[in-house]
Amino acid sequence: LWFIRRATKIFSPKNVRSEFYSYFYPLVFAGGQVSMIVTAELAYHYNWQYMYYFMMMMLMASILIVIVCFRHNRPLKPIRLSELHIREMLVIATGLLMLMYVINYGKVLDWMSSFKIRLYLVIAPILIAFFIWKQYHSKQPYVNLAPLYQPKAIVGYFYMMLVMFFSTSTTLLTNYMTSILKVDSTHTYQLYIYLLPGYVLGAFICFWWFRWQRWRFRFLIAGGMSCFAAFFGILYFTVSPESTYEMLFLPVFLRGLGMLVLIIAFALFAVEELNPKFLLANAFFLICFRSVLAPILATSFYSNTLYRLEQKYMYSLSETISQTDPLAASQFNQSLTQHLAQGHEYTEATQMATQTLYATLQQQSLLLSLKHILGYLFVISLVIAIISRFIPFHKTIRVKYTKAGDDMV
């Protein structure tokens, strides 16, 4: 909060929230991408354990900067222990962590066959429900539930979860690059540098869009969703073994553009009619929905769906492979001849040729699975973009400027 108050004066001297977000969000998301690239470079050029030493030093430096540079605001009166809401913090943190554990490790532990998964599936909803009930009946709640009664806030949370769900699809892109294009981890992370120009352009568009206010808000939302539709559409039509690394630059740029436009737009939309004293409560729900639940739900969905589809296509492809198939027989015999020429025994060469054919089937099943998922994502994002074009988010073109506050963006 101390930093946000100071940064607001730098980025928006007139204290306009839309201008502040147009500077703040690109810096935050760009910092995350740059840190991923630095981490990958350190792991590549040095032993991967040194990466953690570097992270420890950076954390210590951050703590030192906070201690030295941040002003300590002493409270006017002593704060009682009950006012810290330690019990509420532990309840909601435990509930969310259990829920995240179930979503993340469900496939690894075979879902309902695991005692931990069954136990956490029972306890996590109880803890979250108890937390909400406690806040609803408390005179001085830890988190005020007022944002959940605001239709604009609910719409904003929903769209931001969609944005993060679509953005986390880079999991599919990473699988494609490592398994099909054979790109190493360093170049995989370097690809995401092309998100940064998208962030800059998205922030520029939002800055002038909300300053001029000459077009309706729904056009901006439809444009942002169209960027995601273009991202999925380009990937759907270009994913193949013959594609190149450079063909991914444009879709990644479009993803960054659409993501930042929608994040800034709905961060503003969610707090338009919200009482300023509930801004910190809005930050709580914003972080829970956008930064905690949406990414882990998306990661689990993509990994589970990709795994199931790979198994399905692997089975359907392998049941037609036999010596009567001229293409499979030709590839098998070519691989067998090659390994025999290298001096391997016939039995060993046969096993190696079979493994080569199996690896080819794995690649084909992965490509079919990626096409399947990307096709659905393309259609869904395109439909949402068209629907958003006709949703009356605002009754008028021009809306009132909102001052920036302690909302932790």
Image: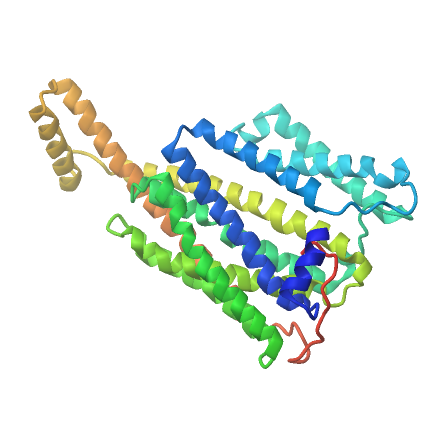
Quadrant in the picture for residue 311:
top left
Location of residue 232 in the rendering, given as x and y in whole percent from the top left corner? 42, 58
Quadrant in the picture for residue 89:
top right
Location of residue 348 in the rendering, given as x and y in whole percent from the top left corner? 17, 19
381 vs 96: above or below: below
Total numbered labels: 0
- Residue 307 appearing in the image: no
Quadrant in the picture for residue 150:
bottom right
Q: Relative to residue 168, is residue 341 drawn left or right? A: left
Q: Relative to residue 136, is residue 166 drawn left or right? A: left
Q: Residue at x 56, y 69 (%)?
A: 206
Which quadrant holds the C terminus? Answer: bottom right
Q: Relative to residue 303, is residue 328 drawn left or right? A: left
Instruction: Give the residue at the far front of this rendering.
Output: 68
Location of residue 335 in the rendering, given as x and y in whole percent from the top left corner? 14, 32
Q: Residue at x 79, y 62 (%)?
A: 276
Q: Relative to residue 400, is residue 241 drawn left or right? A: left
- Residue 335 appearing in the image: yes
Q: Residue at x 54, y 53 (%)?
A: 29
Q: Nearer the viewer, residue 261 or 105?
A: 261
Instruction: Give the residue at the far left of this rendering.
Output: 341
Location of residue 378 in the rendering, given as x and y in whole percent from the top left corner? 44, 59
